[in-house]
Image (cartoon, rainbow, N blue to C red):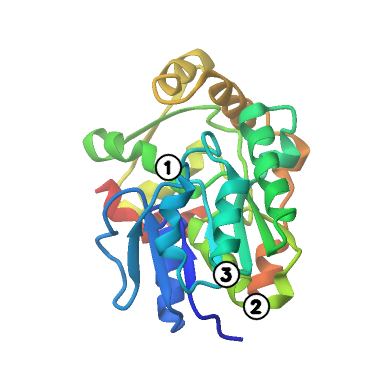
Amino acid sequence: MELNMIVVTGATGNVGRPLVRAMAEAGERVTAVSRGTAPVDLPSGAGHVRADLTEPETLRPALDGAEALFLHDGGAGGHGLDPRAVLDVAKDAGVRRVVLLSSQGVVTRPESPSHGGVMRAVEAAVRESGLAWTILRAGGFASNAYAWAESVRAERTVAAPFGDVGIPVIDPADIAEVAAMALRKDEHTGETYELNGPAAVTPRQQAEAIGAALGEPVRFVELTRAEAHARMATFMPEPVVETTLAVLGEPNAAELRLSPDVERVLGRAPRPFAEWARRNVEAFR
């Protein structure tokens, strides 16, 4: 079944960018939505509209003629987002399907306001919207390793806490491929997919994988929890820092569980971190 048009919010992000590309390559009409200027690599034939999801009416021009919406908070973590208002605008514009990028924390950290509570409310709004819906609960992103890009480029060093504690991070391109399927096919309506990687990978192993992609060693420096907290607190709210450190340092059984959902949807295993590192090695040169 072909859709008239697909709208992708968060289109400059690590998931939105490959999703726009995948939709364009599949021959779909796609509109990329971001708060800033169009992505520099916007595919030929794809449109772009500037909008801010915290101001739902700004989304209306992007939704003209659209039948499906990929809903992503654009990095706001759901804060400042009124999902019901966004979905009302979408429904009023004629959208009939929504795919939400949510967080694994909805089920693994339900007590956390930042990781569980906010996105649980967004999920509820999607389910109650009257639209056909699919929810993608993603674990930790492989692309979080971009935080080390500057130190790798300058010193060939990765500094992180909990060097030998691993979690199964997910390649954002895999999330994008699952989203592309859910946006186009009815069979994914009403499904909630948990998306993570093929195996737990530690920060030390990630540093080794980046080094292998570069063809030269990358040194791993282990931070104390306090040192990591101080660094993260410069760009994260305190509750987010605490929950993130708990996930990284003491992942629970649900966070370590290897989900079959990527393979269930795509017919192949999720990509390992080393493949993500090879594909994105230029960021670390």
Determine whether the residue tagged by mark 1 lies in a helix, strand or loop.
Answer: helix
Residue name at image x 63 percent, y 73 percent: 266
Residue 139 visible from this viewpoint: no
Distance (Cα) linking label 2 and label 1: 32 Å
Kind of residue at badge 3? Gly
Amino acid type of disc 2? Lys
Q: Is residue 224 left or right of residue 167?
A: left
* 273, above or below 238, in the image: below
SS for dot 3: loop
Of callouts 2 and 1, the N-terminal one: 1
Identify residue for label 1: 145
Percent coordinates x, y for residue 20 in the rendering: 42, 67
Q: Nearer the viewer, residue 206 or 57?
A: 57
At x 77% / y 38%, what residue is drawn? 253
Callout 1 touching callout 3 (CB < 8 Å) = no
Q: Which residue is mark 3?
A: 94
Marks counted in the figure total 3
Answer few, some or many: residues within 10 Å of disc 1's Cα (few below 14, many 20 plus, some between 14 and 19): some
Residue at the front extreme? 92
State left or right for residue 245 relative to residue 279.
right
Which mark, by number, is residue 32?
A: none
Decide: is 159 above or below 135. above
Identify the residue under disc 2.
Answer: 185
Residue placed most toward the observer, 168 or 63: 63
- As helix, strand or loop, the secondary structure at mark 2 comes to loop
